[in-house]
Amino acid sequence: MPRIHNKNTREPRQKRSIEMKQRIMEAARLLFSEKGLHGTSSNEIVEKAGVSIGSFYSYFPDKRTLYLEVLESFINTVSAHILSDAIEFRYTGEEHDIKETLYQYLKNVFRSFDIDLRFHAQTIALRFTDADIAKIYDAAEKRELQYIKNILIQFRKSRPLGIEDIDMAAKIIHGSIAYLVHSIKFFNYRSDEDRLINELAQSIFKYIA
């Protein structure tokens, strides 16, 4: 998402300024997690961050701009966690290799929701009513879909797959994962997470094999 700049705001270059902006963003994320966007005031943010209101407005023209930048930073962190330990595509074609790849990816997805579950839940709900928030989430989803497609493409190089349309298969896999992780993390659906991840990896393998 393009950053919203204002002629009266500035991008920090010195270490002290960078740290101050980060302090404001971290304080804002904690308050947004607790009280939401509309329940949090700029004065509360600067008080928690330990900075002046003038410092706040030197970096952010308004609270909404701050919110979007905090969200973009948060989603980038979540995406980096999901795609961390990126699988090196060196498959032998063995069933175990494919299942282990799927298991590692699924484990990363589930654990990424623990970074800040309350903020994640609040912002993902706003995705359906706020176009700017939707753009941030859509960009992250596009990266995840491409990652799943890359996995499927590499699988296909090592062994025949039972799917015909990789684009649609990636969307089906991504949607299935999203439904389950949202059910468990957001709606307190009780389940043994490790067992669920293992069974989901098995199910996806059976779908694509």
Image (cartoon, rainbow, N blue to C red):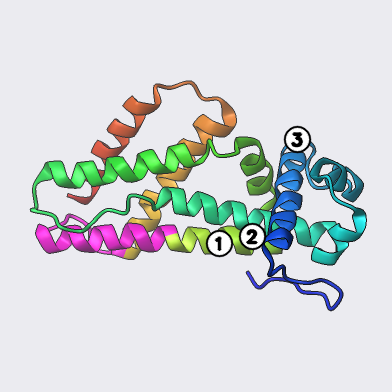
Q: Residues within 10 Å of mark 2 (few under 14, many from 20)?
A: some
Specify start and end residues of the magenta stretch as a single range. 144-166
Which amino acid, mark 3? Glu
- In the rendered structure, are the residues bearing label 2 and label 3 in contact, judged by CB atoms less than 8 Å apart? no
**Residue highlighted by disc 1:** 138
**Residue highlighted by disc 3:** 34
Question: In x, y percent, where is residue 113?
Answer: 52, 39
Q: Residue at x 47, y 44 (%)?
A: 178
Q: Does residue 136 show up magenta in the picture?
A: no
Which amino acid, mark 1? Asp
Which amino acid, mark 2? Ala
Tag on residue 134? Answer: 2
Q: How many marks?
A: 3
Q: Quadrant of residue 168?
A: bottom left
Q: Nearer the viewer, residue 65 or 206?
A: 65
Task: Decide if residue 129 is in sight here.
Answer: no
User: Which structural element holds mark 2?
Assistant: helix
- Nearer the observer: mark 3 or 1; the answer is 3
Q: Is 150 drawn above or below residue 172 in the view shown?
A: below
Labels 3 and 1: the sequence-earlier one:
3
- In the rendered structure, are the residues bearing label 3 and label 1 in contact, judged by CB atoms less than 8 Å apart? no
Work out how far the residue at label 1 is from the one at label 2, CA to CA, in angstroms. Answer: 6 Å
Labels 2 and 3: the sequence-earlier one:
3
Question: In x, y percent, where is residue 74?
Answer: 60, 51
User: Which secondary structure type mostly characterizes the magenta part of the structure?
Assistant: helix
Work out how far the residue at label 2 is from the one at label 3, CA to CA, in angstroms. Answer: 21 Å
- In the rendered structure, are the residues bearing label 1 and label 2 in contact, judged by CB atoms less than 8 Å apart? yes
Question: In x, y percent, where is residue 86?
Answer: 32, 54
Locate residue 110 relative to residue 133 in the image: left or right.
left
Q: Does residue 149 show up magenta in the picture?
A: yes
Work out how far the residue at label 3 is from the one at label 1, CA to CA, in angstroms. Answer: 24 Å
Q: Residues within 10 Å of mark 1 (few under 14, many from 20)?
A: some
